[in-house]
Amino acid sequence: MLQVLSCRISFSSMPKPRGREHTTLTETATVVVRELYKVPGIKMIAPGEISTTSRRKGGKRFITIVTTNGGCELIITGQSVQKVAVHTSDVDTIVKTLKKTKALREFSFSQRSRKPGT
């Protein structure tokens, strides 16, 4: 079950968090995570730190999908930048779903791979 309370999202079907818990999402990342929650096969969604950027004051929003050994990392850029780790075995389904989603049609997508040892 997904709950959104002022940019805080609670995942009741996800495993218990280990270590530090980052639950705050930027407005842009909240839109993306809402759509991710609808995709089957995701084991865990882990929001990362938020870093502000002075380069962009507005305009186009970007999602960079970085494929890793454990799934993928989404670098979501709007007025600030936030990384969201997605633990899954089927990254292709996530990429296709995000690109087709009506709520994310104004985002620009790019994709790259970061797999050590390959």
Image: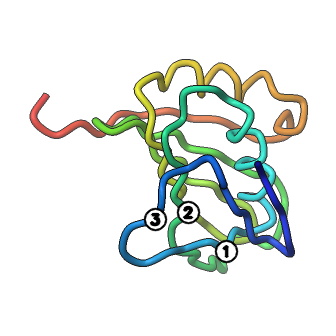
* Residue 4 location (% of width, % of height): 84, 63
Which residue lies under the disc numbered 3?
A: 17
Q: Quadrant of residue 40?
A: top right
Q: Earlier in the sequence, mark 3 or mark 2?
A: 3
Colouring rule applied to residues: rainbow
> Where does label 2 land, which residue?
47
Q: Amino acid at mark 3?
A: Pro
**Mark 3 vs mark 2, CA separation in Å:** 11 Å
- Give residue 93's position: percent from left, percent from top: 58, 19
Q: In the drawing, does residue 58 fall left or right of residue 74?
A: right
Mark closer to the observer (1, 3): 3
At a point 78% along the width and 47% down the height, the residue shown is 34
Q: Earlier in the sequence, mark 2 or mark 1?
A: 1
On the image, numbered disc 1 is attached to which residue?
24
On screen, 59 above or below 36?
Answer: below
Residues marked 2 and 1 touching at CB (< 8 Å)? yes
Mark 2 vs mark 1, CA separation in Å:
7 Å
Front-lying residue, 92 or 113: 92
Query: As shown in the figure, which amino acid type bears the numbered disc 1?
Result: Thr
Residue 88, quarter of the rendered image: top left
Q: Please, what is the three-letter code of the amino acid marked with disc 2?
A: Pro
N-term-proximal mark, 1 vs 3: 3
Residue 55 percent location from the top left of the image: 66, 73
